[in-house]
Image (cartoon, rainbow, N blue to C red):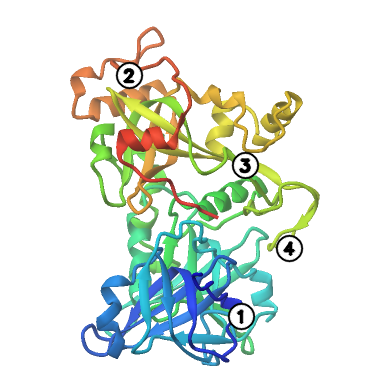
């Protein structure tokens, strides 16, 4: 009988002949490559428990090519030591080190969870209610850039962030994180909210008149700025729903940059097209890097994959929950009488006999369908379909829409996430004229088929297996 893998929570230092079935959810490298470089990782197991793991330079040469973020493995044999350093990546009492007899075997363990952010609440940081030295994740909207300094010796930016409660927290980004932030700030195409996620954050206690603040770790942190991921998407929606006021992102006084605020005069068409490449669906199918594209197409199919058409979430922060019915308390602190349902629907978008899977989130689906996911589910239950996974007839209202789409290609997950859509005929015609096959881009009127050759007759729902056979694509990511 095969040996059952050990659980991360059971690691207590009593044995080092461990067998672990894990996913690497975070991976970063510290030191000089080929000299003093070491790899640091976060493992997660089937229970969602995490542990910090280090592969030092003397072992890294053997394993560097095999260690990949988001991949799953069965591993054996580690040195187990106390997790008592000045800064701790995980709450676990212990951390692991690769040794000479560590065994690493990549395995298909798709059921293992992906990374789950551990967001700290701003009021807790301000009040000093946090575990000293424990690295955490933060999410917030940039409220105001206070200071920046870029030189060969020292590069940093200081800015204020707000959470959904309106609490303000100061953040410092150093070196490459600062450069990433300022580059985005100078190149941003509109004046909308700038929502960021920063992982593995260091918290510095308030000292005298100086408030508590957060900063990136040296190498462990990852910075996401307005990326098309569920947490940022839902934060933006809640920001609008709650009416949280955000100060324009400007540098004070004579440090203000025209590049920072230059997008405020862009038209709606320019905003839609900004920082994006106009591509045909055929061209999008051949893209294998993360880019933002604009195209026009018809929603022709509903794709049924391993995810349901909706997911239960907290009514306040919209974070996904495993509770499908009944009261629960979310990690954001909100007491919920019932979870609220939110759309997550993959659709096939077709253009000139070429198709691609696009992922629609709650706001887009609710606008196109004209009903909330909760309302649709209530009708479905009244019709006798009690199982949440049973797809409702209302999804068919998505079919046949001819739209301009702004999407981000996620090469890692082989899908395209819809950032924006528009049914404005003038905008659709502008995009059509920018496509390579512009001879098909005729003037759009109410009496004219706006996309010559586009199939406007809604097709049936299909399984992801059928779509994968067509496109050679893999299932979309589990984003929780």
Residue 236 in view here: yes
Label 1: few (<14), some (14–19) or many (≥20) C-alpha neighbours in 10 Å: few
Picture quarter with the C terminus = bottom right
Q: How much space separates mark 4 and mark 2, taking CA atoms?
A: 48 Å
Front of the two marks 2 and 1: 1
User: What kind of element bears circle 2?
Assistant: loop
Q: Compared with residue 41, is residue 207 higher up or lower down, i.e. above or below?
A: below
**Residue at x 37%, y 89% (from the top left corner):** 99
- The residue carrying mark 2 is 454
**Residue at x 57%, y 50% (from the top left corner):** 234
Q: Which mark is residue 342?
A: 3
Residue 36 position within the rendered picture, expressed as x and y whole percent measured from the top left: 27, 90
Labelled pair 3, 2 in contact (Cβ < 8 Å):
no
Q: Nearer the viewer, residue 157 or 224?
A: 224
Front of the two marks 1 and 3: 1
Front of the two marks 3 and 4: 3
Residue 427 in view here: no
- The residue carrying mark 1 is 10
Residue 222 position within the rendered picture, expressed as x and y whole percent measured from the top left: 42, 69
N-term mark: 1 or 3: 1
Residue 319 position within the rendered picture, expressed as x and y whole percent measured from the top left: 62, 54
Labelled pair 1, 4 in contact (Cβ < 8 Å):
no
N-term mark: 3 or 2: 3
Q: How much space separates mark 2 and mark 1, taking CA atoms?
A: 57 Å
Labelled pair 3, 4 in contact (Cβ < 8 Å):
no
Labelled pair 1, 3 in contact (Cβ < 8 Å):
no
Front of the two marks 1 and 4: 1
- The residue carrying mark 4 is 333
User: What kind of element bears circle 3?
Assistant: strand
């Amino acid at each position: 009988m095969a040996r059952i893998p050990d659980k991360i929570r059971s690691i207590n230092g009593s044995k080092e002949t461990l067998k672990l079935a894990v996913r690497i959810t975070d991976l970063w490298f510290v030191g000089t490559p080929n000299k003093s470089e070491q790899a640091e990782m976060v493992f997660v197991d089937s229970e969602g428990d995490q542990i910090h793991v280090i592969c030092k330079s003397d072992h890294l040469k053997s394993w560097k090519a095999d260690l990949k973020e988001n991949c799953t493995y069965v591993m054996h044999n580690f040195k187990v030591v106390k997790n008592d350093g000045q800064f701790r990546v995980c709450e676990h009492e212990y951390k692991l080190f690769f040794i000479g007899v560590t065994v690493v075997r990549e395995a298909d363990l798709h059921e293992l969870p992906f990374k789950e952010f551990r967001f700290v609440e701003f009021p807790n940081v301000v009040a000093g209610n946090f575990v000293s030295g424990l690295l955490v994740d933060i999410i917030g909207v940039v409220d105001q850039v206070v200071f920046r300094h870029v030189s060969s010796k020292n590069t940093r930016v200081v800015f204020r962030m707000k959470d959904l409660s309106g609490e303000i927290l100061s953040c410092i980004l150093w070196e490459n994180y600062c450069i990433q932030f300022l580059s985005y700030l100078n190149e941003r195409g509109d004046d909308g909210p700038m929502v960021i996620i920063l992982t593995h954050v260091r918290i510095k206690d308030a000292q005298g008149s100086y408030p508590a603040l957060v900063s990136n770790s040296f190498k462990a942190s990852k910075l996401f700025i307005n990326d098309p991921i569920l947490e940022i998407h839902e934060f933006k929606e809640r920001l609008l729903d709650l009416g949280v006021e955000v100060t324009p992102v400007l540098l004070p006084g004579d440090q203000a940059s025209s590049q920072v605020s230059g997008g405020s005069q862009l038209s709606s068409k320019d905003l839609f097209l900004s920082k994006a490449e106009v591509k045909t669906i055929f061209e999008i199918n051949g893209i294998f890097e993360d880019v933002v594209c604009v195209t026009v197409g018809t929603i022709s199919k509903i794709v049924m994959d391993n995810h349901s058409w909706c997911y239960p979430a907290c009514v306040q922060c919209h974070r996904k929950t495993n509770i499908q019915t009944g009261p629960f308390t979310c990690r954001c602190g909100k007491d919920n009488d019932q979870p609220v349902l939110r759309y997550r629907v993959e659709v096939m978008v077709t253009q000139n006999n070429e198709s691609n899977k696009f992922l629609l989130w709650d706001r887009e689906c609710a606008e196109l369908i004209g009903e909330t996911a909760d309302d649709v589910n209530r009708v479905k239950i009244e019709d006798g379909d009690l199982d949440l996974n049973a797809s409702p007839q209302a999804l068919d209202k998505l079919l046949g829409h001819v739209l301009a789409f702004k999407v981000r290609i996620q090469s890692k997950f082989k899908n395209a996430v819809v950032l924006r859509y528009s049914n404005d005929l003038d905008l659709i015609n502008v995009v059509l004229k920018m496509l390579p096959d512009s001879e098909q881009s005729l003037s759009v009127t109410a009496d004219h088929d706006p996309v010559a050759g586009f199939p406007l007759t809604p097709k049936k729902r299909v399984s992801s297996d059928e779509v994968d056979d067509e496109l050679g694509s893999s299932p979309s990511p589990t984003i929780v």
